[in-house]
Image: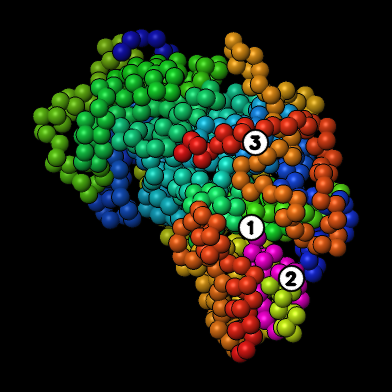
Amino acid sequence: MAKTNGTGTNGAATRGAPVTFLEGIRQAMFEEMDRDPAVVLLGEDVGVYGGAFKTSEGLLERFGWERVIDTPISESAIIGAACGMSYLGLRPIVEMQFIDFIVCAFNQITNFVAKGHYLWNAPAPMVIRGPSGGGVHGGPFHSANPEMYFVHTPGLKVIYPSTPYDAKGLLKAAVRDNNPVLFFEHKFLYRRIKGEVPDGDYTVPIGKAVVRREGKHLTILSYAAMMHTSLEAAEALAKEGIEAEVIDLRTLLPLDEETILQSVKKTNKCLVVHEDTKTGGIAGEIAAILCEKAFGDLDGPLVRVTSLDTPVPYAPTLEDYFLPNAKKIFSAAKELARY
Amino acid sequence: MKKELTRQQYLDLYYYMRLNRAVEDTMVKLFRQNKIVGGLYSSLGQEAISVGTAYALEKKDWLAPMIRNIGALLVKGVPPRDIFMQHMAKYDSPTKGKDGTSHFGDLDNLHIVSPISMLGDLIPVMTGVAMAGRYLGQKIVAMTWIGDGGSSTGVFHEGLNFAATQKAPFVLVLENNLWAYSTPVRRQVQLENLADRAKAYGIDSYIVDGNDAVAVYSTAKEAVDRARAGEGPILIEAKTFRRLGHAQHDPAEYVPKEMRAHWEARDPITLYEKFLTSEKILDAKTKKEIEDKLDTLLAKEREFAENSPMPPAELAETGVYCTGDDCHKIRAKWERPVAEVSPPKSSVAAVWTIPGFGSGKGSGGVNAPIHFGDTPAAAEKSVNAAKSVNGGKSSAKAAAKTTAKKTVKAGTASASRKARR
């Protein structure tokens, strides 16, 4: 029986050795493929090469050519084929070499995969995962945060973890879920972040946010790489006597409204930080939810700290300006705390 | 047409073509009575293709129709009432009114995948079905259809190319009916034979007279047998003509009268009837029996469909997600030993072997340089600084056995996506 975790203060495991974020993902795939022969992996360069980021290192050696499939550069074909496989009871994991390329299969995902269960009762248990996000100077086509295209699509689930523990536990949960799950892996975290994962099998529930830092003066909602930046800002705020509660959303669809509302009820102020661009980002949706369900609890405006409404620029000076950072979060939070 | 089928097979083909046409004739009546909610797309004159190709499949095989492949659905075992109710958006329809036309499927029994309106998407999906069937040891073939128009979509090419590289047991029937809505084929494709598209993927193809039921069936049977035997995907171009407009609303006046007359004289059912009569397979008595059977069946099916209610409004909110095993039992049906695809039997030397040159090396180990974002240890952060003191080697104990600890030079890692695009 899988253990679950994720309700604790930082969701961290209590035992096991520290592994990188990337290694947590690799272990999840490895263990799920070991557990269930219906799990297969498809993607560009995932086999012999082990993936552009080495996320699938060692999988081909162990599971063979039928289960670890190097594909042509054809995102629609890869995702379409995975969908077809899922109809016969397989549980394919698809790697997008960079998540930027997921839009090449937009139609396949939003019209075929996502609508199947609603329309004709056809579950498509599959995971589409890949490296996302900026901060590594990948330029406009290797740094995207396209999560909101898909959060707007009923029928999908969208996960964007921030710790090795969550990455592993949520990916395992995604493989076992009966619905199509998009799993975003912030590439900045791949080898920079380490954390403990338990020795045994465990999953983290999809759709549950987690409080990473408790506080009473304001709530900071974030996810993925910006969760860490938000924690950094929270430490700086604490030095000025402002205790920020930092919540890691972890799943964007379905969104854990309960945890958000509970925190805002306590702090009465809400700041949303995301690396996605501002217009149409999850912060706007959260603002609407708070207006509908917690209007009376708010002592100040909902504040957004996000990337600029531009493509992700290449030059380090430009990208640094484009991205949110701890300083921007700190200033915005300080301003908000005055209300 | 040449004689090579059993009498029953000849009569089956005839029955299903007549059923195909009778079902659509009934739906035209329903449409004129405003009982059909949306559009109605006709396959008049193309029945031999739907019926002849689907008839070449076995019960365990999988198919995914396009909107005009009503005949294929009937051959696979879909009752006419389901087709009527789909078009009428009835609660008892396979999609309970959530979608119309031929947009429905059946994963458990009939092995039908629902199409969507975006053309070509079924090609990779059915490639995946074919790959999964092979993986599970089921020895199935997957079939779908595409039109002359749909063969220009990007996903057609991606899908067929992928199917070719995987040698998937997949048959694609390209119905060249000469018109994509109002645009003639020559304005879409500069190929005389659309079967030539197969050459681009290194797969075999056939060209067949789509109005000759026996030729369509024989060709499809050969293609299905070859795909099942492991020869890879096969493309069949069936040449035909769309006799009516894109849908009921479209009088198709852009089609020259002479062209329509030419093809009306080549009606597939009339041609087939002549053949069956001359071969003494069909006589007046048998024909009458079939017609009576169809009349009785369709009256009953139509009555059932008309009596089915509209779906309750609240149904709109349900079913977006599969909520767990209460909702569906998702089980792979293994027809080969699972041990074959499980370690240690599944384990391989993960290297490319290039004929004439030997093998390259396997992947570079977990500490190999990666594409973007590799960072010096000094830049590392910890989720929980107190706990994560060991920033060193990976602890993947499961990986330890299989991970080759080789070092790859940075240059190898950058043979990248970025360079290709």
Instruction: Count neighbours of disc 3 (C-alpha within 10 A) and say few if under 14, some if 14 to 19, many if 20 or more.
Output: few
Q: How many marks?
A: 3
Q: Quadrant of residue B241?
A: top left
Q: Quick check: B254 left or right of B355?
A: left
Q: On what subunit does the disc labeled 2 rest? A: A
Depth check: give the residue in front, B359 or B250: B359
C-alpha span from label 2 to label 3 = 39 Å
User: Hey, which quadrant is residue B349 in on the image?
Assistant: top right
Residue B295 in the image, given as x and y percentages of width and height = 34, 37
Q: Which residue occupies 55% across, 18% down?
A: B230
- Identify residue type, mark 2: Val
**Magenta stretch contains residue B223:** no
Distance in Å between CA atoms under marks 1 and 2: 15 Å
User: Quick one: label 1 or label 2, which is nearer the N terminus?
Assistant: 1
Q: Mark 1, chain letter?
A: A
Within 10 Å of disc 1 (Cα), the crowding (few <14, some 14-19, many 20+) is: many
Instruction: Residue A22 in the image: state x and y as whole percent.
Output: 71, 47
Dot 2: element: strand
Q: Tell me the kind of residue under disc 1.
A: Tyr
- Foreground mark, 2 or 3, reads 3
Tell me the residue that label 1 is attached to.
A160
Instruction: Provide residue B116's location: percent of width, then percent of height.
Output: 42, 45
Identify which residue is drawn at 62% across, 39% down: A52
Q: Are marks 1 and 2 on the same chain?
A: yes
Q: Is residue B246 visible?
A: yes
Secondary structure of the residue carrying tag 3 is helix
Residue annotated with mark 2? A211
Check residue B57 in the rendering and tell me which mark sits there, or answer none: none
Task: Tell which of A127 and A336 is nearer to you.
Answer: A336
Label 3 in the same subunit as label 1? no
Start-end of magenta stretch: A206-232
